Amino acid sequence: MEPLRRADPSSIAGHRLLGRLGAGGMGVVYLARSGGGGLAALKLIRAEHAADPGFRERFRREARAAERITGRWVVRVLGSDPEAREPWLATEYVPGPSLAEAVGLHGALPEPTVRALGARLASALADMHGAGLVHRDVKPGNVLLALDGPRLIDFGIARSAGATALTATDAMIGTPGFLAPEQARAAGAGEVGPASDVFSLGCVLAYALTGERPFGTGGVAAVVYRTVHEEPDLDGVPDTLLPLVTACLAKDPADRPTAAEAGAALGEADGPAGDWLPPGLPALIAQRSSRVLDLPVPEPTMLVPDEPPKGVSRRGFLAGGAAAAVAGAGGLTAWLLSRRSAGTGTGLGTGIGTLTATGGGAALPRYTIGVLTDLSGPTRLGGRAQERGARVAVETFNARRDRAFDLVLRTADDGGDGVRAKAAARTLLKDENLIAVLGPTTVPSVLAAVAEFVDRSVPLVSVLAAVPTGTTVQGQTIRRTYFEPRASPDSMIVPFARYLSEREVVRTALVEDRAGGRYTWFAVKSMKATPPSQALGGVATSYPVEEDSEDFASAVRAALAADPQGVMYVGTSPRRAALCAKALRDQGYKGYRGSVEPVLQPEFLTLAGPAAEGWFIGTGFADPDGLPGAQEFTAAYRKRWGLAHTTPVEPYATEAYDVVNWAVQALDTAVRNHSESEQSGVTNDLRQTPYQGLVKTYSSTGRESSTASLVGLFLWQVKDGVPRFLGEFEKAALAGT
């Protein structure tokens, strides 16, 4: 929420204005307090638009439509005057976030939450349709979340079913990505009926369940084309809800269920509210509610209708030293991503957000952590793990009572592609509160993103992608902004090799999979130069399998003829590693065998089957269940993402959690030091100050130091068909010797 401007009125029709919730070309939405003390969202239409008879009629229609809807899950109309010089409409104020913001902050919502959400939205739509109205703009931004359930808002383009549209003949009404095909085609008004709202409801349900729009993103024309001509992407929608969502998204309106039928399929809409929201959201809503209730009355403003305002005041959020309350409908996201203030000496100087919290309901400054990762491409499993770990870190931090600021998480999907990463980085940079970015998963994405972030001194930290030594990373020669606190992929051979050395293995066979390219060549060269048990005369011998061949049986036969005590598959393909494992098993080898991180994938375990049993794998990621002090994280992670206590935490989720906390440590230092630029302050501290995380000590020396490249190496073994974490590689190698 923004403070009132000098050109704003102090009151409207007995409503005392407290601040601006949002503004657009047509008017302003204020937070107001009625004469009886209640809070309202008051929409005021600019006089120049009210002078247009067609526009005023549309506003009359909005007011009439809103007053006719009295269901529990819509905002109530508290008053209106469509005939005033500047027409206004006051509705119930809901301090909770919109569904769009909730998904942006917390990710996809759990199925029970979405069922409750959908049942209540369907009830609201059924009430509307029963009153002869069609909403026509059901979307996440028009759904506010309250403690007792959602509220459907914004009836600005609602109309009576069958009524003549007041828009241009070929106008498209609704929001691309959430409108029905008949709306996208700008069809005649008679074709846009209650079934259009049901289609939009299906889009909202899919979005809430997956965090993605079912018809994708991009330009309006592309989204509209997909809506009309292509099937929705419903990957990630649970099987229990897939039939309903699919039915709602039928191209033919006649094939869709009614709102009442959709509600019945989702469950009870008017039962007790209970704890329908996932962890984190109830506390956020309660916190914002308490702040709004403590709002003081601002000093009177002057209405100067003949002179436009010169700009926004950059004083503290409200007069009298009080800090801003967080806005609800319309302006909430804008306030969360508010532009930096100039400061007054009592806050953070040129810091982002508003004044430092000092109690008494004061709003905390907000900073944004970005996650630029692959959520839809070939490395999406690692990308999703990073985003999940980062989100748990942000939510855990925001739950701390002693925090000096709040965090917001913004995620951008690059699909593992450099071109998309450049565009995604530019999207994140539109948020001036951005202080650090986690990701990406691929080297092309790193190189493209660094080029965008470097000029703003925004640090980029990767725990998964590994830029090859010698590769030029833009802007990193003088003031470094790219950090790679991970073990080098070239060092992944070390854990198994060390295990062999501790067991005095002197003959090691290397199955050299030349499909692994440069990685295989370098690993074989390193193993031959420094074989296990070198001090005892150890030797490593390689047996190649050409890139265009899958004859691992011949290579294994040649290797076993030398009577090796240990065999290492040197390559990067889980499928080809499985072929190697099967060949070893078929030829009766029962000695030590192992490989490196890229192999440790479900594909290897599935294809190799029993042949994978006993394999040792060196990785750069840990299992938090095997780390001292990680119990709180694992419990929070599983609860947040609805995982059983036996389900493993995904690779690199814990490392992402650690990196966010490393950035928070750096941000805390920058804030306490009143850094002129928080981004530069965070970057400087990342360069200078290590962080002890759950997995390891994170520092800025990872890419340059050969010693640091071995920090964070771990050993796993396949037991009973499942990878088992043995721990940090040196300790794991010594165990049992």
Image: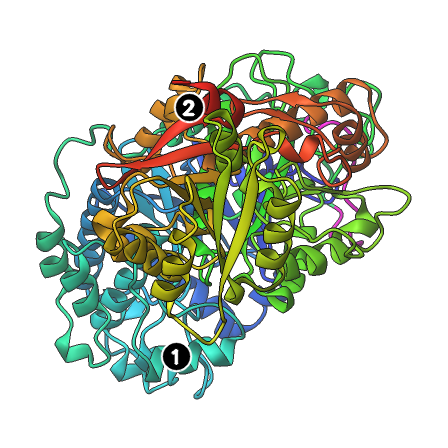
Give the number of callouts.
2
* Residue 101 appears anywhere in the view: no
Relative to 226, is 31 above or below? Answer: above
User: Is residue 384 in view?
Assistant: yes
Return the residue nearer the eye: 632 or 297: 632
> According to the image, label 1 marks what residue?
226
**In the rendering, at what x and y percent does residue 186 appear?**
39, 84
Residue 703 % position (x, y): 73, 41
Which quarter of the rendering shows the C terminus?
top left
Q: Which residues are magenta?
A: 304-318
As rendered, which of 272 and 496 lies closer to the eye?
496
Q: Earlier in the sequence, mark 2 or mark 1?
A: 1
- Circle 2 residue: 633
Identify the residue shown where x is 26% and y is 68%.
199
Q: Disc 2 or disc 1, which is closer to the eye?
A: 2
Classify residue 336 as left or right of residue 583: right
* Mark 2 burial class by Cα count in 10 Å: few <14, some 14-19, many 20+: many
Q: Residue at x 85, y 51 (%)?
A: 475
Secondary-structure class at tag 1: helix
Q: Quadrant of residue 370?
A: top right
- Picture disc at residue 132: none
Q: In the picture provided, is 313 more to the left or to the right than 185?
A: right
* Magenta-drawn stretch contains 311: yes
Residue type, mark 1 in image: Arg
Q: Of 431 and 305, which appears nearest the observer?
A: 431
- Residue 393 placement (x, y as % from top left): 50, 29
